[in-house]
Image (cartoon, rainbow, N blue to C red):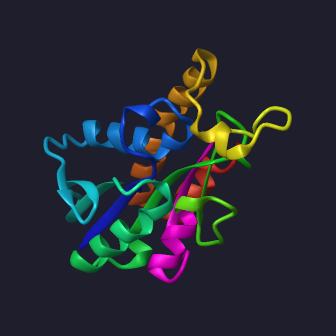
Amino acid sequence: MTRMVVGLGNPGPKYENTRHNAGFMVADLLAENLRVTYWKDEAGAKVGLVRFGDGDLLLVKPQTFMNLSGKAVSKLAASYRIDISDIVVIHDDLDIPEEALRIKRGGGHGGHNGLRSLNDALGTGEYCRVKVGIGRPPGRQDPAAYVLEPMRSAAAERLTSMVPYAAQAVIHILEHGIESAMREYNAG
């Protein structure tokens, strides 16, 4: 059995230190912890393949930019015959406060263009989500500008502090299932 963990973000140095790259940050830490030694370019994504438990695990960072993430994910899911229920997506979420995360299965896109693309390409939103809180923009700042602007040091530190916690939550999902992970991580 093969499962897939997708970190959503935007490729390139311009976006490295942005809130929208929370998914990439978590995927990178997972890759380090699971000893992914090689990322290959496949289906418009960076893909790391590792053995996990009794199956394979694909770590995926779409390189198509957020708004087109679904194309790469759907191609990989078809190629590796991965069921939608075996996909975990890590992404930023404006509606969750900073330094918090939520786990859920299914749902709409909530205005998140990466999730919109995934839902459109997969035909459903019934994959698992690890939602990393980034909070709402201050004042009347445009949410699109907020998620794509380089973070100042305090905001970067808060997001960086959540990355290991989110990576731990993903491992919990893979080892114990989503229901257990929701009980453990959604309590706060």
Residue 139 screen position, x and y as percent: 85, 33
Question: Is 162 in front, or is 44?
Answer: 44
Give the residue at x 48% y 29%.
Answer: 17
The vertical placement of 159 against 22, above or below, is above
In this view, which residue lies farthest toward the right?
Answer: 139
Horizontal relation, residue 40 to residue 12: left or right: left
Q: Which residues are magenta?
A: 115-133
The image quadrant where one finds the N terminus is bottom left
Question: What is the total number of numbered labels drawn onto the structure image?
Answer: 0
Give the residue at x 68% y 61%.
Answer: 111
Give the residue at x 34% y 66%.
Answer: 72
The image quadrant where one finds the C terminus is top right
Horizontal relation, residue 111 to residue 54: left or right: right
Give the residue at x 48% y 47%.
Answer: 169
Residue 11 screen position, x and y as percent: 37, 44
The vertical placement of 79 against 170, above or below, is below
Residue 44 screen position, x and y as percent: 28, 61
Residue 187 screen position, x and y as percent: 69, 48
Tell whether position 99 is magenta: no
Q: Which of the 4 quarters of the picture holds residue 162?
A: top right
Horizontal relation, residue 118 to residue 184: left or right: left
In this view, which residue lies farthest toward the top?
Answer: 153
Question: Is 153 in front, or is 49?
Answer: 153
Question: Is 113 in front, or is 133?
Answer: 113
Question: Is 104 in front, or is 16?
Answer: 16
In this view, which residue lies farthest toward the bottom?
Answer: 123
Tell whether position 125 is magenta: yes
The vertical placement of 143 against 79, above or below, is above
